[in-house]
Amino acid sequence: MPNMSLTKNPMPSQDPVERASNFKEVALGYTKEMALDEAARCLNCKNHPCTQGCPVQISIPEFIKKVAEEDFEGAYEVISKDSSLPAVCGRVCPQENQCEKYCVRGIKGEPVGIGRLERFVADWHNEHAKEAPVKPASNGHKVAVIGSGPSGLTCAGDLAKKGYEVTVFEALHTAGGVLVYGIPEFRLPKSIVQKEVDGLKALGVKVETNTVIGKTVSVDELMSDEFGFEAVFIGSGAGLPSFMNIPGENLKGVYSANEFLTRINLMKAYREGADTPIKHSKAVAVVGGGNVAMDAARCAKRLGAEHVYIVYRRSEAELPARREEVEHAKEEGIEFKLLNNPVEILGGEDRFVNGIKCIRMELGEPDASGRRRPVEVPGSEFVLDVDCVIMAIGTSPNPLIKNTTEGLETNKKGCIVAEEATGKTSKDMVYAGGDAVTGAATVILAMGAGKTAAKAIDEALSK
């Protein structure tokens, strides 16, 4: 019998007061009983609208049916046909705007908890699976993948399963890209990412860290006789931070969210004696309203800040962050200063931050994005008393690869121009996808781009 409850099984989580002072995972995951009960809410619709909303086209009703039958390994096999990172996606994908958005159960209640079930299945597999993936026989073709983030790992995994000899080149000392340097431990434990990377290595994927493409070696050199790669996929992400260009941004205590999160997530700056410490502040202003801003704010709180403010120029209705992340931030004591915009960062002794001057905003007519444009309220300036400011207003691709690759077309934002249907760039046998093409976007969209490019590379090399 279907479970006709109008609400999802709630996700167990750490107590907000307790978790605000530690970096352990907030969401604890479904129990077996919760997963079975939630799977019974799926109606197994004829047209599978949820699958149409998935950028990597996972057979969602099929895997949920396996869960309902208590065939959890079978469910994992269904998911892993289309996704190389199920434990990651189950945690960080914005399912509410993708698969769950199209769930029929969402018409008169809450959609099926597809993401929560995906996480349960992946975690069950990681806990119980004993055998490593079997490396396929080599087909004799070599492909280079630049960047070990979600698009690069997906492309590498799909090609490795077909017998390609794949080498992933990563600039940092740890594989995972934004999954390890950008997303905090309390949202995505790094052990989970490492297990996914280890699974790809078992398929034969080689990972070369500390290799900056454009400095250590160029794209053109990768395709030379010396290296012998027949195709290259660029999934180098968008790691160049944006700033507002207001007075005071060069003061001590002003971070880009990229730097702040990298120090914490990758360098473990929250630990005693860390090599790359973060200033422990009393009051922090995080400028921006996306998921990165929420991550930075929640990290600052865990570092001991008494007050952490989200400063955002629009209202709560326009916040681009996931609703779940906003709710978690509020539960942990993050204070929201909405309809406010910074105009100057104030400096005190020794050029340290000593406040941020803001101006109040009101919403006017819609702009090109369809959202109401924020307009300054004259004479409404005020000073927020903080000693640290984190800029979380977006990122763009690093120009190193485009500047060192002959014939690679980019747009005015510095993003690589690539065909949406194939990932092909202007350079023969060079493909690209993820944030390097779109600018900062979601993990699952980057994975979809990696999957698309892998299919196109296979078609080109198997002719």
Image (cartoon, rainbow, N blue to C red):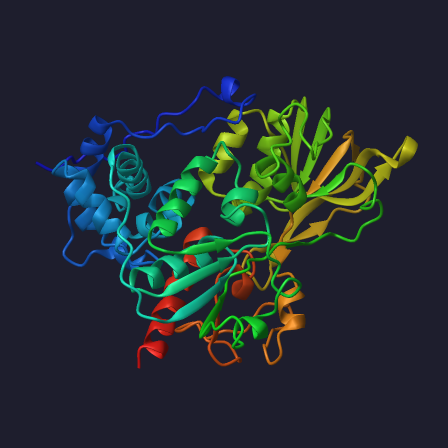
Q: Quick check: 35 above or below 444?
A: above
In-front residue for pair 54/360: 54
Q: Is residue 41 visible?
A: no
In-front residue for pair 439/72: 72
- The answer to which quarter of the image holds residue 307 is top right
Q: Position of residue 107 (x, y in %)?
A: 26, 47
Left or right of 457 in this view: 211 = right
Residue that extends furthest to the left in the rendered view of this protein: 1
Left or right of 18 in this view: 272 = right
Residue that extends furthest to the front in the rendered view of this protein: 226
Q: Quick check: 431 above or below 50?
A: below
Give the residue at x 62% y 52%. Answer: 394
Counting labels gives 0
Q: Position of residue 166 (x, y in %)?
A: 41, 62
Give the residue at x 84% y 44%. Answer: 248
In-front residue for pair 346/372: 346
Q: Is residue 345 visible?
A: yes
Q: Quick check: 18 above or below 445?
A: above
Q: Position of residue 420 (x, y in %)?
A: 43, 72
Give the residue at x 67% y 71%. Answer: 403
In-front residue for pair 302/221: 221
Which quadrant, please, contains the N terminus? top left
Which quadrant, please, contains the C terminus? bottom left
Q: Position of residue 183 (x, y in %)?
A: 52, 41
Left or right of 309 in this view: 455 = left
Q: Quick check: 63 above or below 347?
A: below
Residue that extends furthest to the right in the rendered view of this protein: 349
Give the residue at x 39% y 50%. Answer: 201
